[in-house]
Amino acid sequence: MIELEIQALSERREGLLMEVGRLVLASGFSLQRQRLVQDPHGILLTMVVRGPPRKKRALAAALDAYERIISFELEPVTEGEERAHFAASRAPSAYVPPVLPVAPPVPEAPPATAPTTPAAATAPAASAFDQVAPVRLVTPTAAPAPPPAVAARPAPEPDLEFILPPPAPAPVAPAPVVVAEAPFVELVPLEPDQPAIDKLLATLATEYPQIMPRLQQLDHAVAEAAREPTLALAGRRIGAWLAQREPAAGGQLNLEQAIAQLGAPALRALVEVEQDGSQLHIRHSPLCGEPGHSGCIFFSGFLEGLLAPVLGGRELSIFAVCCRSYGADDCVLALSD
């Protein structure tokens, strides 16, 4: 078995984790951990999966054919080394270009003057006698006959100017309504709410299996950042409690036997469940009724605590393939070891 790290860039977050998870399971791998981060470039998905080395090429082909992934990288996981996401925004450089020197102004040339010739400079001034024009005698003659009268041409009429009304202005399209989208804020997970879990466990002996109303109260009572860790730990504690209360008679079991003999019957006491091989279809989950408010993490923790004693120390991996709170008909859990 090898561990591979998938780094992918996508435009939308909704349902991305579940859809990529289905591709991973269909390619023969199991999910180990995952992370979604909002970035100016889009949604950054990081997912660590485990599976046979010969299936790596099939997984890469499935990711390449998935239309919601813009680009991705698939690399082996190095223990103790955390790779930065290839599509994450880089920090701006601190380099500042030097200021270029300003060129000195070019001096303007003096205006050109007309050259003086020696003749003009030395020519003597004309006398007053030379400047008087000579007298000319004119003999009177008969005045010439006036030319025949020419009929005056009528002045051309001015062109008529038609004053048209100004054209109606084109209708202005209304400005598009910009709907401000609430920014996505990734919550930092908090520690599980231990007092709330202890209060729930105190009622198990008298109220089990009618515990779903108390689980719904727990789901809404804890802080949002502590909700999933609290539900997961409560599921593991309840599953372990049930495994001690009703120990399996068959000893060590393989995964599908453990699901059929223990997992599915125990879940049917809480919700409506159907088994399909190593997958469990949970119908009408009361913890997944609100949009975007999944409670499948409780059922995953419940199965971990219940099946751990009969799997002989084998690590159990549970992945939520789809959820009712994200528009699916059923909540589907895929189990692998």
Image (cartoon, rainbow, N blue to C red):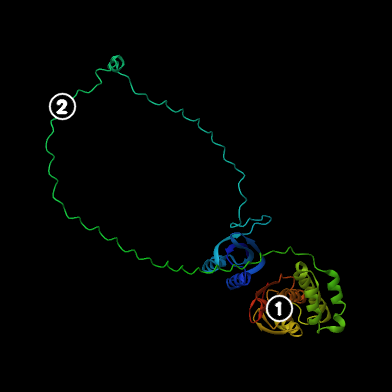
Foreground of the two, 316 or 70: 70
For the image shown, how many numbered marks are present on the structure?
A: 2
Q: Quadrant of residue 304?
A: bottom right
* Residue to which mark 2 is pinned: 137
Foreground of the two, 160 or 107: 160
* Residue to which mark 1 is pinned: 288
- In the image: residue 223, left or right of residue 73: right
Label 1, label 2: how far apart the Cα atoms are = 130 Å
Query: Where 267 falls versus 123 (above or below)?
Result: below
- Residue 103: which numbered mark, if any? none
Where disc 2 sits, the SS reads: loop
Foreground of the two, 260 or 271: 271
Q: Residues within 10 Å of mark 2 (few under 14, many from 20)?
A: few
The kind of residue on which mark 1 rests is Cys
Query: Where 132 falls versus 83 (above or below)?
Result: above
Where disc 1 sits, the SS reads: helix
Give percent across and percent down for residue 311.
73, 74
Q: Quadrant of residue 305?
A: bottom right
Disc nearer the start of the sequence (1/2): 2
The kind of residue on which mark 2 rests is Leu
Q: Where does the C terminus fall, quadrant-wise?
A: bottom right
Asked whether disc 1 touches disc 2, contact meaning CB atoms under 8 Å apart, the reply is no
- In the image: residue 231, left or right of residue 7: right
Pair 1/2: label in front: 2
Give percent across and percent down for residue 122.
29, 14
Give percent across and percent down for residue 205.
87, 81
Q: Residues within 10 Å of mark 1 (few under 14, many from 20)?
A: some
Give percent across and percent down for residue 169.
46, 67
